[in-house]
Image (spheres, grey):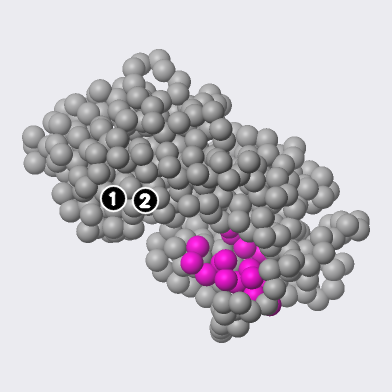
Amino acid sequence: MKSFRSRTLLAVGTVAALAVTSCTPGSGSTNPQPVPTGAVRTDAAALGNVTLTVWDQEVRGGQAAQMEQLNKEFQAKYPNIRLQRVSRSFDDLKTTLRLALSGNEAPDVVQANNGRSDMGEFVKAGQLLPLDRYAAAYGWNGRYPETVRQYSSYSADGKAFGKGNLYGLPQVGEVVGLFYNTSKLAALGLQPPRTWPELESAMAAAKARGEVPMMFGNLDKWPAIHVFGTIQGRTSPPGDITTLAFGRKGASWKSAGNRQAAQQLTDWAGKGWLEPGFNGMGYDPAWQAFSKGTGVFLLGGTWLQADLAGAMGAGVGFMLPPPAKAGDRPIATGGTGLPFAVTAKSKHPDAAAAYINFITSEHAMSVLTSTGNLPVADTSRQSAGAGLAKDVLTAFGDAAGAGGLVPYLDYATPTMYDTLTASLQDLLARQKTPDQFLDSLQKDYGDFSTSNG
């Protein structure tokens, strides 16, 4: 997942030191506690007085609202379980979680980026608890199809991604699509584009009228992954993208479709279709500028739904990236938000699993919907009314139903996030040609494939 959040830091509860102050490099042991093998206890009220430390990255708008509501309801139902919540931005969480898991005071429940560079490494180090026993006890496998569970599944040695043991459970689904300013499109005399050539024509028309065609900020480096991945979905078979993204053998970055996508991204920048100052603009300032009327389009994830709806009302729409030609299967980058996992050092794994079960229950999915989020389970049962919420639910359902969701590209190897973000910056700055860009990705991918066996 990849729902990268704002840089706000919020601490809730009495975690004055955020549990990480004692986790200096080299402290503690990387050897996990023994994996429990006894019967699973699902009666949370009978677990005695327990304190759970929970790290999440639900810091923005509707994301924070749903988490606050569900935590409040959980503690009301189970007063014997006290929650100490530490809520951090994606970047902050990514920076500190590795250190925290290796220390003596690891949290009980964490949201872990499910890519190889994070969850894969945590699994390899034995720092996360396999949740298969809990999945069976709570019926998670019935509510979460394999196509969702694969995003949180690894072999016990961390080598195989997308199969093996279950190590986390997400709350939300995600899809990267096209937000558009309805009034600006109308002023241009245009409808939402039905094909990729229509999108490019609309951006050219917007540029000619002095508008910013595509709002985009890449100061944080990772937003370009979503833009490149979206273009790639028009130029490459989805099976090849999935093979690359899961780090499996059988595909190559050095393909004609990937080169076409890299060239097209370079062309967009050269034609002035992207926000002129994108290299110096952060992700949050970019979508916030879009919400205030700058830009006709914004390629972004469904995690922006609540914020954009609150700021723009009926003035914003959402659609899947249009296909290369009419009638093609919808292809979009997406999957799930960051899953909630139980750490191997948790002294209260049954309580931790009960908490995860509560915040991913059928009731929780309705809370997610009401707070402007996209539930990953029971999606078809939700009623979102009209407007942006309906657009988002429909888009996710269409992509998932057609098998058109492809994974985030930085999942591919433990180092692909750094390689891809740096290489995309160089590509956009014209410091690398498309071929040099793909050479960098193929080297990372090839080195990992060789070492991973």
- Residue 296 in magenta stretch: no
- Which residue is labeled 2 in the image? 421
Q: Secondary structure at mark 1?
A: helix
- On the picture, is 212 further left or further right than 251? left
Residue 361: image x %, image y %? 69, 49
Q: Which of 273/293 is in front?
A: 273
Q: Residue at x 63, y 68 (%)?
A: 101
Is 350 on the left-hand or right-hand side of 95?
A: right
Task: Read off the magenta span.
Answer: 94-113
Q: Amino acid at mark 1?
A: Gln
Q: Mark 1: few, some, or many residues within 10 Å (few <14, many ≥20)?
A: many
Name above or below for residue 116 compared with residue 261.
below
Q: Residue at x 56, y 50 (%)?
A: 116
Residue at mark 2 to residue at mark 1: CA–CA distance:
6 Å
Splitting the image into 4 quarters, where does residue 26 fall? Answer: bottom right
User: In the rendered image, which residue does mark 1 sit on?
Assistant: 425
